[in-house]
Amino acid sequence: TFDKWYVWTLSDVQWGSRYCLEAKFLQYVTWATKTPNVQIMLLADLMENAIPTHIPQASFEQTRHPEDQLHELLHILKPLKSKILFSITGNHELRTWNQTGFDISQILAQYLGVPYRGMGGYETVKAGKETYLFAYHHGSSASVNNDKIDLNRLKGIYPGAELYVAGHNHSLFAKPEPVFDRDEESESGKKLKDVWYVRSGSFFDYARYAEAKLMAPQKPGSAIVKLYTQKHMIDVSIS
């Protein structure tokens, strides 16, 4: 028995870009392979997938053809498939969908044999005797000045979750905020609980486009959620 389970919120690898921090990503893969009490959410932008009709200059900054990127990711992730809760799509994968109607994210999920959830939704995660409710989406706002923009939108669409998580802006961010919940057993009829807001980070170096737009560099890595098994408690590591 474990005192906690980990949830790796994996997004924004952008495998195949010259700016992809491959060695760091593979370190996390090794950790997940060796850790029995980990589950993984694939939150999109796993491949660079630069195509000429969308940000053409990005095609010059990828080191592999998109088809090779997909095959290599499948090879890397296949040993972890029993630990993957689901996969969704994001803006990098949607570049192909927008031009052809071909959904790369769905193909990746099918080959891995994991559920494909489209854009976002709820996920119930069990950790021992405890059950936790997540709401997730890849994200749409690139702002790093307000990490909660997408998370507040997500909360409006999927209310009642204990943790809201999105990627996309490459930010590593985790913050709990206390709210009241119903407690019919207490005299006041309410109790405090934390709702977590998480941005899942990236494995992407400081790119030329970011420098050109005076965007702030972001710390690479992934948010790792800790779900405790003997008491109902969430913690998030972004170190």
Image (tube, grey):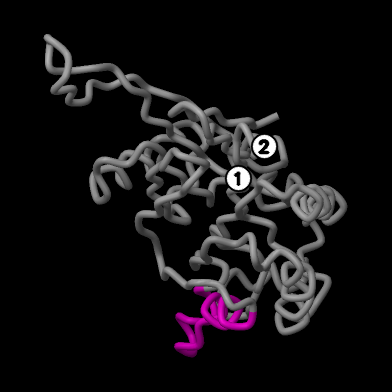
For this view, does 204 lie left or right of residue 8? right
Question: Hey, what amino acid is under mark 2?
Answer: Gln
Position of residue 219 relative to residue 105, above or below, is: above
Highlighted range, magenta:
94-111
Q: Residue furthest top?
A: 187
For this view, does 140 lie left or right of residue 128? left
Q: Dividing the image into 4 quarters, which one contains the N terminus?
A: top right
Nearest the camera: 3 or 70? 3
Give percent across and percent down for residue 197.
Answer: 43, 34
Tell whether label 1 touches label 2 (CB within 8 Å). Answer: yes
The disc placed on residue 218 is 2
Q: Residues within 10 Å of mark 1 (few under 14, many from 20)?
A: many
Residue at 41% x, 42% y is 131
- Residue 107 included in the magenta stretch of the image: yes
- Residue 81 included in the magenta stretch of the image: no
Residue at 49% x, 47% y is 142
Quadrant assignment, res 18: bottom right
| Measured Cα–Cα span from mark 2 to mark 1 | 7 Å
Quadrant assignment, res 70: bottom right
Nearest the camera: 87 or 217? 87
Label located before the other in sequence (2 or 1): 1
Position of residue 64 relative to residue 162, above or below, is: below
> Label 2's element?
loop
- By secondary structure, the bulk of the magenta-drawn segment is best described as helix
For this view, does 107 lie left or right of residue 49? left
Question: Hey, what amino acid is under mark 1?
Answer: His
Q: Dividing the image into 4 quarters, which one contains the C terminus?
A: top right
Give percent across and percent down for residue 35.
Answer: 75, 47
The disc placed on residue 170 is 1
